[in-house]
Image: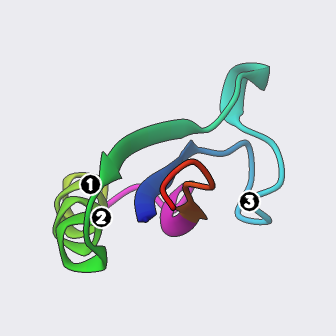
C-alpha cells in the first residue's frame, strides 16, 4: 500500500536546502491517497503564500509490510 506525506516547511533561503533554525522538514500524514495529500498540500501552501521561503511537496512511500 502506498502512503503519501506532505513534506517541507520554512527554509533559510529560496534554494530550499536547509530548514530555518536547522531542524528537520515537517512531515504531515500519512494520507491514503494522493488526492488527500494534495488537499493538505494546498492548505499549507495557501497558508504561507506570502512567505517565499516556505515550500511543501508530496512524497510517496510504499509499505513493504502490506502484501
Q: Position of residue 4 (x, y in %)?
A: 42, 62
Q: How many marks?
A: 3
Alpha-carbon neighbours of circle 1 within 10 Å: few (<14), some, or many (≥20)? some
Q: Position of residue 5 (x, y in %)?
A: 44, 55
Q: Is residue 58 magenta?
A: yes
Q: Main secondary structure of the magenta part?
A: strand
Looking at this rendering, what residue extends furthest in the bottom direction?
Answer: 35
Distance in Å between CA atoms under marks 3 and 2: 17 Å
Evaluate if marks 3 and 1 touch, with contact meaning CB atoms under 8 Å apart.
no
Evaluate if marks 1 and 2 touch, with contact meaning CB atoms under 8 Å apart.
yes
User: Is 42 left, or right, of 34 in this rendering?
Assistant: left
Numbered label attached to residue 16:
3
> Disc 1 marks which residue?
44
Residue 48 in the image: above or below residue 39: above
**Residue at (20, 78) in percent of width and height:** 35
The numbered mark, 3 or 2, whose residue comes first in the sequence reads: 3
What segment carries the magenta color? 50-60
> Disc 2 marks which residue?
41
Amino acid at each position: 500500500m502506498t502512503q503519501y506525506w506532505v513534506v517541507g516547511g520554512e527554509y533559510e533561503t529560496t534554494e530550499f536546502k536547509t530548514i530555518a533554525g536547522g531542524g528537520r522538514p515537517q512531515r504531515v500524514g500519512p494520507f491514503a491517497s494522493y488526492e488527500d495529500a494534495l488537499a493538505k498540500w494546498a492548505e499549507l501552501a495557501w497558508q504561507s503564500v506570502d512567505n517565499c521561503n516556505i515550500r511543501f511537496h508530496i512524497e510517496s512511500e510504499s509499505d513493504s509490510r502490506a502484501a
